[in-house]
Amino acid sequence: MTVSLYTASVPVFQQMLGSLADLLAKSQTHATEKKIEPAALLQSRLFPDMFPLIRQVQIACDFARGVSARLADIEVPKYDDKETSFEELQTLISQTQTFIAGIAPAQFDGGEEREIVTRPGTPKEKRFSGSSYLLSYGLPQFFFHVTTAYALLRHNGVEIGKRDYMGLK
């Protein structure tokens, strides 16, 4: 059985972005019920040199959009990443889901061997085939940031578990 780049990416991003939106909704409810200032959760970090929750969500969305766009050979949309609230993060996730839902599966055709260049012209430039980009770079990066967001919320007392992380209702 062959799995297309589209099938291995967009539905996965959609599931996990939906999960992330649900995790944030539960976190906002938790903050309200426990009388916790939302910024305490939004700016929380697992360790001082790690990004806070807000940035973890932004980067997860960046990867979902960027990976999908590059594999479909379309322009990667630019976002300002200026979110400061749960509501603004929900909007970012929704915009990301809408963008990737608008990419047709056929746009991914031939992307397995398409050259993907990240950070072109910089010392961090990397070159991948489309398949390698998705499987060894894009998906691991995306999952790292979604998982870190989950861990931050769980660490801060939000009552969530594996089913929540997986987006299982």
Image (tube, rainbow, N blue to C red):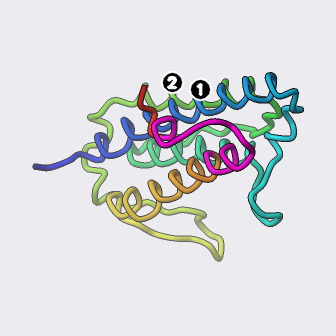
Mark 1, residue position = 95
Secondary structure category for the residue under label 1: helix
What residue is drawn where x is 78% and y is 34%? 83
Q: Is residue 55 left or right of residue 99?
A: right
Q: Is residue 49 left or right of residue 19?
A: right
**Residue 157 higher or lower than 125, as above or below:** above
Secondary structure category for the residue under label 2: helix
What residue is drawn where x is 31% and y is 46%? 8
Residue situated in front as seen by the camera: 108 or 43: 43
Mark 2, residue position = 98
Q: Amino acid at mark 1?
A: Gln
Residue 71 in the image: state x and y as whole percent: 39, 48
Q: Amino acid at mark 2?
A: Thr
Cα–Cα gap, marks 2 and 1? 5 Å
Residue situated in front as seen by the camera: 157 or 48: 157
Residue 75 shows in this picture: no
Quadrant housing residue 96: top right
Point out the residue furthest to the bottom here. 123
Q: Is residue 17 left or right of residue 59?
A: left
- Tell me if label 2 and label 1 are in contact, CB under 8 Å: yes
Residue situated in front as seen by the camera: 71 or 144: 144
Number of labels in the image equals 2
Residue 41 in the image: state x and y as whole percent: 80, 40
Q: Residues within 10 Å of mark 1 (few under 14, many from 20)?
A: some
**Residue 88 higher or lower than 109, as above or below:** above
Q: Residues within 10 Å of mark 2 (few under 14, many from 20)?
A: few
Find the magenta span and give its range.
150-165
Residue situated in front as seen by the camera: 43 or 62: 43
Residue 162 in the image: state x and y as whole percent: 48, 43
Is residue 163 within the magenta segment? yes
